[in-house]
Each structure stands twice: as C-alpha cells, then as structure tokens.
C-alpha cells in the first residue's frame, strides 16, 4: 500500500491518542498515586487495581481499550472519502498501540498494551475481538494467570484473522502484518512475565503480591 498525506496524518494522530496514558490520567484525576510508582510500576489497569480502587482500574481498562478502537472505527466509517482503507485503519490501530507502549506525553514509559490491543481488534472486526477475548477468558478461568491469558490471546489473534479471513471478515495483508507486529510486541512487553511463569513465581489473578 502507498502512504498519502491523509494516511500519515491518521497514523500520527492515532499514535498521539494512544499516548494518552489513562492509568496515569485517571489516577491523578482521582488523587491517587502514580501507578508507575508502585506495584509492577506498569501504567495499566492491572496495576491500578493493586491500589484497591476497582473503579479506577475499570475506567483505565475501558479508556485504554477505547483509544485503540476509536481510530480504527473512525477510519472505517469516514476514511473512504480520503482514500483510507482497512490497511490504514489497522496501521492506525498499531500506531495507537505503540503510543500506549511508548507514550510521547509520559516519557515513553507505557503499559503492556493488552487493553489497547483488544480495542484495536474490536475496531478491525468485532467477531475477531470477541473470539480473542473469549480465548483470554478461558485461559484466565482455568489457569488464573492474566499474563498467560494475554500471551495465548496474542498468539491466537492473528491466527484467527488468517483462518477466518474471507469468511468472517475480509482478509487484508496489511491488517495481518499489523496484527502480527502487535502480537510480537505483546510478547516482548511480557518477557518478565514469561520468565516468572517459567520459574513458577508469577502472581495469579486475585492473589496479592508479597513483593514487587
């Protein structure tokens, strides 16, 4: 695909939207401690939950997902008049995801991107997002590891897209590449979790960490 000025603008704006670290924004708005200062020091919903404020964690989760979904949705809805198709929408979603991982507004100290990636998937194809979300839930219920659930879901997301491409949704090479890149980055951002999973020291869902 060729890049035009509207597509480049869409990708850059999407990155800036993704750079809104809602874990930090919500916490500061509610007078809470910066999530980068406690727990895993990861600015994401899971770490905000460690503060004990479930409402703040839920707000962070929804807003982080929203910033991944919104650019993709808007391009799908209104991008055709500017020559923006599914490929650009997927790249915009990837840009929002990268903004979450490396936010320009917050010293490039971002989260792991699970919620934002979920939002991107929902924007690309709601059924794809649903299938990946159900995969996350099944692993979480049976194994009680959020990180393992995220890793399994990250592996299956591009696989689902490829397998059902042309059946449940149109198959686009640029979209597939964007999904693969997102999945690889999710694995990279979870590298410490992978080590803890291998060592048997990873915290389970609902368990309180003794030491961070």
Image (spheres, rainbow, N blue to C red):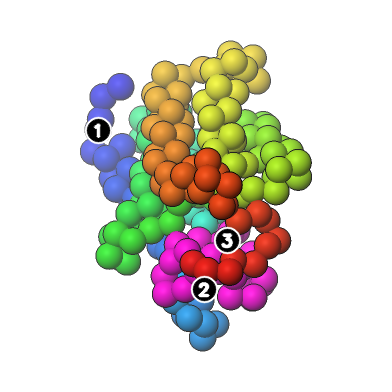
Residue drawn where x is 46% and y is 19% of the image: 172
Q: Secondary structure at mark 2?
A: helix
Dot 1: few (<14), some (14–19), or many (≥20) neighbours within 10 Å? few
Query: In the displayed structure, does residue 26 sit left or right of residue 88?
Result: right
Please tell me the numbered disc located at residue 12: none
Inspect this view and state whether residue 196 appears. Answer: yes
**Do residues under tags 2 and 1 come within 8 Å of each other at their CB atoms?**
no
- Residue 83 percent across, percent down from the top left: 36, 30
Query: In the displayed structure, does residue 177 sit left or right of residue 149?
Result: left
Residue picked out by circle 1: 4
Q: Nearer the viewer, residue 29 or 183?
A: 183
Inter-mark Cα distance, 3 to 1: 38 Å
Q: Is residue 165 magenta?
A: no
Inter-mark Cα distance, 2 to 1: 35 Å
Residue drawn where x is 52% and y is 69% of the image: 211
Q: Is residue 48 magenta?
A: yes
Residue drawn where x is 64% and y is 75% of the image: 52
Residue picked out by circle 3: 46
Query: In the displayed structure, does residue 204 sit left or right of residue 48?
Result: right
Mark closer to the chain start, 3 or 1: 1
Quadrant location, the N terminus: top left
Q: Nearer the viewer, mark 3 or mark 2?
A: 3
- Residue 164 percent across, percent down from the top left: 62, 17
Q: Nearer the viewer, mark 2 or mark 1?
A: 2
Q: Which residues are magenta?
A: 36-63
Residue picked out by circle 2: 26
Mark closer to the chain start, 2 or 1: 1
């Amino acid at each position: 695909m060729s890049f035009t000025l509207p597509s480049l603008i869409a990708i850059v704006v999407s990155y800036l939207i993704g750079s809104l670290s809602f874990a930090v924004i919500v916490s500061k708005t509610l007078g809470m401690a910066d999530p980068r200062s406690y727990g895993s020091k990861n600015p994401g919903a899971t770490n905000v939950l460690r503060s004990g404020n479930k409402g703040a964690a839920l707000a962070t989760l929804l807003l982080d997902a929203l910033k991944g979904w919104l650019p993709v949705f808007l391009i799908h809805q209104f991008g055709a008049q500017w020559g923006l198709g599914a490929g650009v929408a997927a790249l915009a979603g990837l840009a929002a995801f990268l903004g979450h991982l490396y936010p320009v507004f917050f010293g490039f100290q971002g989260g792991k991107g699970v919620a934002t990636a979920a939002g991107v998937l929902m924007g690309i194809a709601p059924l794809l997002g649903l299938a990946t979300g159900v995969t996350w839930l099944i692993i979480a219920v049976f194994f009680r590891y959020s990180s393992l659930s995220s890793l399994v879901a990250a592996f299956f997301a591009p696989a689902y897209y490829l397998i059902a491409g042309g059946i449940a949704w149109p198959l686009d090479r640029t979209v597939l590449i964007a999904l693969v890149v997102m999945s690889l980055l999710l694995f990279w951002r979870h590298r410490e979790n992978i080590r803890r999973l291998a060592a048997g020291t990873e915290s389970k869902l609902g368990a309180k960490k003794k030491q961070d």
